[in-house]
Amino acid sequence: MVEVLYGIQAAVAQGRQVMPATLRHAVEHLRRCDAYSVVDAADTAAARTPVRWFLAFTADRTGLARSSTESEQAKDVWDLRLWGASGRLSFAGNDAFCHNGRQPSRPISQAWLREAAKAWAAEALVSITPGPVRAVIGAVGLFSEHLGRRPDTGADPEALGHRDVEAFLARLSRLHQAGTLSVGQEGPQHRLGRPFPAGLQGDGPDPARGGARRARR
């Protein structure tokens, strides 16, 4: 019942009107389902009805209220509302979240690189808008894909060196020349040479603080 009250409060705060009949039917649905939480009952309500909307809205807002930027970092897809923005940030590839003609980004497969990217993104989102952060994470996804071609799939950061970075930048150049890398994509991906590859060189850039130590030359 507390969740229902919170859902009403959140709806009113957004200027949404919740009719008494909707609340009555929503509570009746929760009782019939014997649900422990609104989340458990939202998907079982009749589709495209005010009850389904209210329960789904309430489940979303209560979930957001229980989350924090710290807890979100354990996930591979982040809800950027926790940083005061909108949309999602994915470290697992983002086909489902692409819009405005953006190409889908590649997943970051190496655990050390993914954790380094998350550490950097969590800090960057405090002062940078999501667009540039998404661009850098997309670039890291390309770098991850490139490292995945190594015999060891890039799993050990200690085994990486300057040649990996040089080969990656050469690949970006080839993609650009082939027309498969737009100018808008190229900028952030070449800037990746500062945040991540610089870390592989041991220069201690932002994202790499959570990842690799000095790499071999």
Image (cartoon, rainbow, N blue to C red):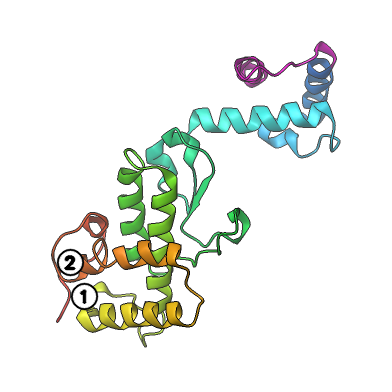
The numbered dot on residue 158 is: 1
In the image, residue 6 lies at what x, y percent? 61, 18
Q: Which residues are magenta?
A: 1-21
Q: Amino acid at mark 1?
A: Glu
Quadrant including the C terminus: bottom left
**Total numbered labels:** 2
Q: Residue at x 78, y 20 (%)?
A: 27
Left or right of 7 on screen, residue 113: left
State the residue in front, 202 or 15.
15
The numbered dot on residue 213 is: 2
Q: Decide: few, some or many residues near mark 1? Use Cα within 10 Å; few <14, some 14-19, many ≥20.
A: few
* Location of residue 212 (image quadrant): bottom left
In the image, residue 97 lies at what x, y percent? 59, 53
In the image, residue 126 lies at what x, y percent? 33, 38
Judged from the image, the secondary structure of the residue bearing numbered disc 2 is loop
Q: Amino acid at mark 2?
A: Arg
Q: Residue furthest top?
A: 20
Q: Residue at x 64, y 31 (%)?
A: 59
Judged from the image, the secondary structure of the residue bearing numbered disc 1 is helix
Figure check: 70 above or below 31: below
Tell me if label 1 and label 2 are in contact, CB under 8 Å: yes
